[in-house]
Amino acid sequence: MHRYTVKGKRQMKFSIFHSKRLIYALMMAIAFFLSTFNFSLAAKAEAKHYTELQLPPLPTVKIPKYERFVLRNGMVVYLMEDHELPLVSGTALVRTGSRWEPAEKVGLAGLTGTVMRTGGTIKHSPDELNEILEQRAASVETSIGEASGSASFEALTEDVETVFGLFAKVLREPVFAQEKLDLAKTQVKGGIARRNDDPDSIANREFKKLIYGKESPYARTVEYATLDKINRDDLVQFYQRYFHPNNMILGVVGDFDSKKMRSLIQANLGNWQRNPKITKSQLPEVQAANKGGVFFVNQPQLTQSSVLIGHLGGQFNNPDYAALDVLSGVWNGFGGRLFNEVRSRQGLAYSVYGYWSPRFDYPGIFLAGGQTRSDATVLFVKSIQDQIKRIQEQPVSAQELAYAKDSTLNSFVFNFQDPSQTLSRLMRYEYYGYPSDFLFRYQKAVAATTAADVQRVAKKYLKPENLVTLVVGNQTTIKPPLTGLATQVTPIDVTIPGVQPQAKN
């Protein structure tokens, strides 16, 4: 009974603290709205168009004070105090990712990231670890994505020593329990079985294959066959290859004293031996798998089409990234060209978008698309193609440029709503080798972008002749047919390999 009472109190406190944060954010939003509303009323009694409103300038973004230091074993550490709430959280970024897993064992990285936490540690079984954290309304989580791995914790200030100790044990002493690996594989298999249930998921998955190539680490998918080849030793070896103190960045933010936190980190992670042989893994090569073409996934049960159009893109560190982002702003949103033209004026779309989507250290994708009626599919694709050519041939208007830039610059403040966001961004920039003030450089570049810049980058980076078009829809109801877009339409088979056909009664 005592255990239940303690657990309940801690969960209540945890909920109250998060509720306070939400209430505070809501109050600030209401205050901003009221001040804006009163300001506009004072300026003029009658209603104005939003472009005529005179709003006060947004507050200058300031980076909270933080410390950065390196342990003797090579671990980079960031500390940022925030005493608003009695909470402490932290994240370790690990230089790893699924893009480095063997092609015949796709799914290995994700399983390693999952079972590293669920499998328990040398000193604590999975159930014991869960119980200790649950009693304190705390959490410790791990995962491995495409380009990085992470381990994180969150705890009340009074429990930070205990929870950080468990966090360190998960980082340093995971046991990868076989039964938890079996459970994780079963869950992944369930995801494979359901992956064709959603047409948008089909479109996103298959479009990556068309852009990067189906064997590319940025597009390949886990299959039953690759999953069956993965065993516990594979997880252990993958972990041992990447999880070393000199291959990670740790950041801690919250209600703590930096001197004491330094001591806590040193006590739990300072004696972790570095790996002198670890080197930066070579990035997989990226080339465009297709330079044009129309592709189709037939889904007879659908009454509408999911459409994706695009080609290989670029990286955030491209000098023209800010202008390309403004170009995206001209297209998107309720005041953007695609919404106004394709959706509102022509009535061809339920949703429509187009943007330059870069990545930190490999080429991203230029992407446009949306959802439309089956009988409007061909017209929808042609309309987007027209908008791509239009932005190359005609300069954007002053109103469009102002809308795109203001939308970006006015949302800038939301990148720094709380210290944890700021700390995460600093860590991410260091992880990928970007300057710590990259976002502020980007902000200045957006402000300096001209209409001529937008047209210049549209001509330079958008390739209408190389557009790959993918349609997921019902072949019998797409009228006119997709041959109106190209003489050759390539079908894509999304049958899940390894699934046995059901026997007929």
Image (spheres, helix red, strand yellow):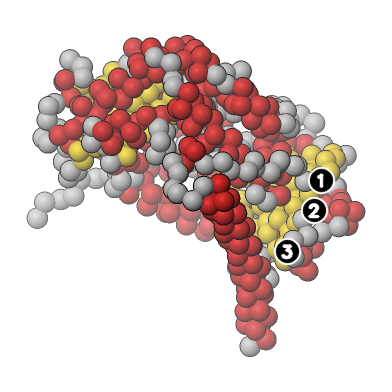
Secondary structure under the numbered disc 1 in the rendered image: loop
The residues bearing labels 3 and 1 have C-alpha atoms spaced at a distance of 17 Å
Residue 294: where, in percent of width, then height? 26, 21
User: Does residue 286 appear left or right of residue 488 in this picture?
Assistant: right
Q: Is residue 128 above or below residue 333?
A: below
Examine the image and state in which quarter residue 482 appears. top left
| Callout 2 amino acid | Glu
Q: Mark 2: few, some, or many residues within 10 Å (few <14, many ≥20)?
A: some
Secondary structure under the numbered disc 3 in the rendered image: loop
Residue 50: where, in percent of width, then height? 46, 41
Front in this rendered view, residue 119 or 7? 7
User: CB of mark 3 within 8 Å of CB of mark 1?
Assistant: no
The extreme bottom residue here reads 1
User: CB of mark 1 within 8 Å of CB of mark 2?
Assistant: yes
Is residue 250 among the parts visible in the rendering? no
**Residue, x 76% and y 29% (percent of image)?**
277
| Rendered image: mark on residue 65 | 1
Would you name the residue on which mark 2 appears? 81
Would you name the residue on which mark 3 appears? 85
User: Does residue 393 appear left or right of residue 401 in this picture?
Assistant: left
Mark 3 or mark 1: name the one nearer the start of the chain: 1
**Residue, x 62% and y 79% (percent of image)?**
8
Secondary structure under the numbered disc 2 in the rendered image: strand
| Callout 1 amino acid | Lys
Mark 1 or mark 2: name the one nearer the start of the chain: 1
Front in this rendered view, residue 59 or 472? 59
Examine the image and state in which quarter residue 410 appears. top right
